[in-house]
């Protein structure tokens, strides 16, 4: 098997994913300890904090960070970067008095009183999260994917280290978990800022001007005009399950969901973001070279290879997995993950490629899609909450996601000229091994086999699947070279 060519999509994606994978290994290995130090209620407070800060972090730069990849010349890119960093600073600072005055009443109204002691940390988290996003796009433009990979490992290590330290010293409230998240953001932002400061300072000294930033403000005005609202709706819709569970039920249910997100959704999000960063850079160039359809089809194949079989296995084993790994009190978190697994798959394969809306400068498409997602999730969760069932809430939420993200995948293929029969062929090739594995796991469940036997069987099936993919697709490590 030949190594990926220097500068290939595969090499860049593998650099990012190697760091993302190691970062998530650290998080997952620490999870069994953290779940025995902290209870579901503490994870519920963490889930609420992340829900609030992630919404605002997505839009604190008015989405100008997305435009960093688009200019042909570095002198324009450094002005876009300077503009985005400045906007993050200004908006984050303005959030401090708002958070301290409006935050507590809103938390009480949303029945999230447990969050009030930690609201003062929210603007700090939003600032570092926003600056980190800008620096991520700047380093992606420079193709410093190795630096980004190392930064993610450092972020995960710092976060887990602080959380373990707080828990082992008896600080087992949600504050210990929140402190870890904030520590990771600070370490990651500082690392990226220091690693690229020489080039950034030189470019800023030579080209960064107020006139240049104003020109960027006008040139890329579609990003705040459409992308801010699309991102805001997308982020709010992502956090709706947390808010609805807290409002209709209790922080304990939020804690179950938060653990599922930490173990499954967050790793998938980070791996997907790694692919999305490289895809965005390649698609921006492929648009001008006429090879966009090739890049999209190859990316889809790679995403399905990575996600379909593992996520569908969770439908059969998630409750047993969570009970064995994290303790019997976390069984319900496994049930939540079991319900959400199909939705996570459809989201994972479509979300990285949704950056095409920015590449094609058709941000209004993303705005309309996110409006539909927000409305459908609000209705689904509201109905489930009214009926008083957490499982029904999440099942309806997952169903709406499968339908809308499935539509998004088909729409992207149609717009970029990828044949739907090719997509169906990829799904069949990657999906058929699930039939025998699923049948065996179903029989083990029916005959009430030991959870350990079920998990070992699933692990064996997963190992055989990836060995098969490695052997049947020798180009696995050199995918996407057509965009290089």
Image: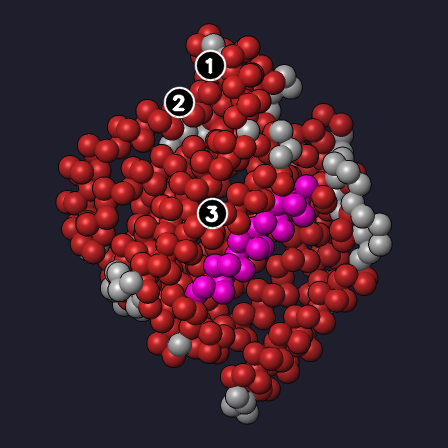
Q: Earlier in the sequence, mark 1 or mark 2?
A: 2
Considering depth in this image, is 68 or 188 the residue closer to the camera? Answer: 188
Residue 458: x and y in percent read 61, 76
- Asked if residue 25 lies in the magenta stretch, the reply is yes
Q: Earlier in the sequence, mark 3 or mark 2?
A: 2
The residue singled out by tag 3 in the image is 155
Give the residue displayed 32% in from the left and 50% down from the top.
179
In the displayed structure image, the side of residue 87 where residue 279 appears, left or right: right
Give the residue displayed 32% in from the left and 52% down from the top.
178
The residue singled out by tag 2 in the image is 86
Snapshot quadrant of residue 434: bottom right
The residue singled out by tag 1 in the image is 213
**SS at mark 1 in the image:** helix
Look at the image and tell me whether residue 120 can be seen.
yes
The C terminus - image quarter: top right
In the displayed structure image, the side of residue 432 where residue 374 appears, left or right: left
Give the residue displayed 45% in from the left and 64% down from the top.
30
């Amino acid at each position: 098997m030949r190594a990926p060519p220097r500068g290939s999509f595969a090499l860049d994606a593998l650099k990012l994913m190697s760091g993302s994978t190691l970062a998530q290994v650290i998080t997952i290995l620490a999870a069994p300890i953290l779940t025995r130090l902290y209870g579901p209620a503490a994870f519920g407070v963490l889930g609420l904090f992340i829900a609030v800060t992630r919404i605002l972090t997505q839009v604190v730069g008015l989405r100008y960070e997305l435009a960093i990849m688009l200019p042909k010349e570095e002198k324009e890119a450094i002005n876009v970067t300077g503009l985005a960093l400045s906007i993050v600073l200004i908006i984050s600072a303005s959030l401090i008095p708002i958070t301290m005055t409006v935050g507590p009443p809103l938390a009480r109204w949303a029945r999230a009183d447990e969050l009030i002691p930690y609201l003062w940390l929210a603007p700090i988290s939003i600032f570092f999260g926003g600056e980190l996003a800008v620096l991520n796009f700047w380093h992606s433009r420079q193709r410093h994917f190795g630096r980004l990979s190392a930064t993610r490992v450092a972020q995960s290590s710092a976060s887990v280290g602080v959380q373990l330290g707080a828990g082992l010293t008896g600080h087992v409230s949600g504050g210990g978990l929140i402190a870890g998240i904030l520590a990771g953001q600070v370490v990651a932002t500082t690392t990226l800022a220091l690693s690229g400061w020489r080039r950034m300072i030189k470019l800023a000294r030579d080209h960064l001007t107020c006139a240049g930033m104003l020109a960027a403000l006008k040139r890329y005005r579609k990003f705040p005009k459409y992308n801010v609202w699309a991102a805001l709706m997308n982020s709010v819709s992502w956090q709706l399950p947390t808010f609805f569970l807290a409002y209709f039920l209790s922080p304990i249910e939020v804690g179950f969901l938060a653990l599922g997100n930490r173990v499954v959704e967050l790793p998938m999000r980070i791996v997907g973001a790694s692919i999305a960063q490289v895809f965005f850079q390649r698609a921006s160039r492929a648009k001008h070279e006429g090879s966009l359809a090739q890049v999209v089809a190859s990316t889809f194949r790679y995403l399905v290879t990575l996600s379909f079989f593992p996520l569908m296995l969770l439908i059969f084993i998630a409750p047993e997995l969570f009970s064995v790994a994290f303790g019997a009190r976390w069984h319900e978190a496994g049930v939540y993950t079991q319900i959400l697994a199909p939705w996570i798959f459809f989201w994972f394969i479509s979300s990285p490629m949704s950056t095409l809306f920015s590449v094609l400068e058709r941000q209004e498409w993303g705005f309309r899609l996110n409006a539909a997602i927000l409305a459908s999730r609000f209705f689904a969760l509201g109905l489930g909450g009214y009926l008083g069932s957490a499982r029904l809430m999440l099942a309806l939420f997952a169903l709406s996601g499968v339908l809308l993200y499935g539509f998004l995948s088909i729409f992207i293929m149609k717009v970029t000229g990828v044949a739907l029969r090719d997509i169906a062929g990829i799904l069949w090739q990657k999906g058929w091994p699930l039939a025998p594995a699923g049948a065996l796991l179903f029989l083990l469940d029916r005959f009430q086999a030991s959870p350990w036997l079920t998990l070992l069987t699933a692990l064996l099936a997963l190992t055989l699947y990836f060995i098969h993919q490695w052997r049947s697709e020798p180009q696995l490590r050199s995918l996407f070279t057509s965009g290089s």
